[in-house]
Amino acid sequence: MNISGSGSSSESVREFILLGFPCSREIQVILFMFFSIIYLLTLMGNGAIICAVFWDQHLHTPMYILLGNFAFLEIWYVNSTVPNTLIDFLSETKTISFTGCFLQLYFFFSMGSTECFFLSAMAFDRYFAICHPLRYATVMTRQQSFNLAISCWVCGFLWYLVPVILISQLPFCGPNAIHHFVCDSGPLLTLSCAPAPMSKLISYTLSSLIILLSFFFILISYALVLLAVLQLPSASSRHKAFSTCGSHLSVVLLFYGTIMVMHVSPGSSHSTLMPKIMTFFYAMVTPLFNPLIYSLRNREMKNALWKVLEKFKMSLKVFDSRPSRSVK
């Protein structure tokens, strides 16, 4: 490894080293297998939700259109970090280029910001459907849900653009070792040769704003939903409403509980192990659990997933029943 100790210009650092989880070679292989299993299960679970929403006409509603986009987001969220992490587990150098590091930083934080916007949009959708059911069908049309999804994508990818540009313009003279398995803004700001209070302030402010504002918006939405649900006349209606919203709340608590410790809690950057654990949970565990939570607690989604499985089985039977061509 070429860990720079000093330098005189920002051009001296052309690559960074992601130290990841320093341990023996045997443990690295075990971690590689563990992360690979989580990665594959995440792709399969969220891919199944996308297929179910796409193929089942009953799921072409605002709630499931947002859910399909959310599952698509989760696939790209893990793809922004996990493949490079898997390579590093088996690599001796564990290097990432200067450009590659900042591209990963941008996409990783953009995906996280987009997830905050989508969770807020899904909370608003549930609030409107339960608290204003008579107006819901006319206001939240399919076109409106697509517009809402596009807005989440655009706002998410614009939110953290300025901090990434500011941090990338800082001088990096050495050392070039990042005590993380992803390119994060905190370690990169620490590695800068010159103090950057403005870049740090903007980065911390934007991260905290998107997390806290979206979290409080979701809490207010579900507080209003709870009041509306408690006023429903029948127990079955209350149970259905709680079941629909319960899955969303589970995802919210899992995601925000870890991300707040990482990006909002004061002094969270002092430890080198805690950021890795928290990042692992909100960047890998949450995308893995999301399809399980939504499918296991939602009858319509379970039925749609069974239909997808049946179509897959029928496709395999048709493929296997094809007569093989004889080679002359």
Image (cartoon, rainbow, N blue to C red):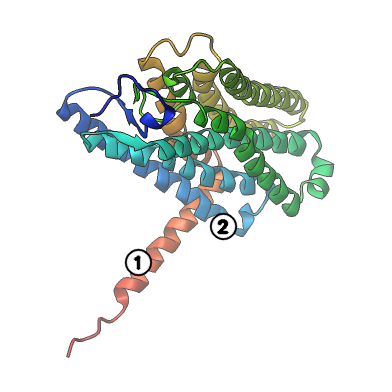
Q: Residue at x 77, y 46 (%)?
A: 140
Q: Decide: few, some or many residues near mark 2? Use Cα within 10 Å; few <14, some 14-19, many ≥20.
A: some
Q: Which residue is mark 1?
A: 316
Is label 1 or label 2 in front? Answer: 2
Amino acid under label 2?
A: Phe
Above or below, 48 relative to 283: below
Disc number placed over residue 291 in the picture, else none: none
Q: Residue at x 34, y 21 (%)?
A: 175
Q: Measure how far apart labels 1 and 2 are at the Cα level.
A: 20 Å
Extreme bottom residue here? 328
Amino acid under label 1?
A: Leu
Res 251 → quadrant? top right
Left or right, 197 with reference to 133: left
Between 11 and 98, which is closer to the camera in this rendering? Answer: 11
Extreme front residue here? 8
Q: Quadrant of the N terminus?
A: top left
Between 166 and 318, which is closer to the camera in this rendering? Answer: 166
Q: Secondary structure at mark 2?
A: helix
Nearest to N terminus: mark 1 or mark 2? 2
Q: Which residue is mark 2?
A: 54
Q: Position of residue 116 (x, y in %)?
A: 61, 32
Q: Quadrant of the C terminus?
A: bottom left
Q: How many marks?
A: 2
Q: Residue at x 65, y 54 (%)?
A: 60
Q: Position of residue 185 (x, y in %)?
A: 49, 25
Q: Position of residue 198 (x, y in %)?
A: 60, 18
Q: Secondary structure at mark 1?
A: helix
Q: Is residue 51 visible?
A: yes
Q: Is residue 292 visible?
A: no
Above or below, 129 relative to 12: below
Res 177 → quadrant? top left
Q: Position of residue 103 (x, y in %)?
A: 47, 39
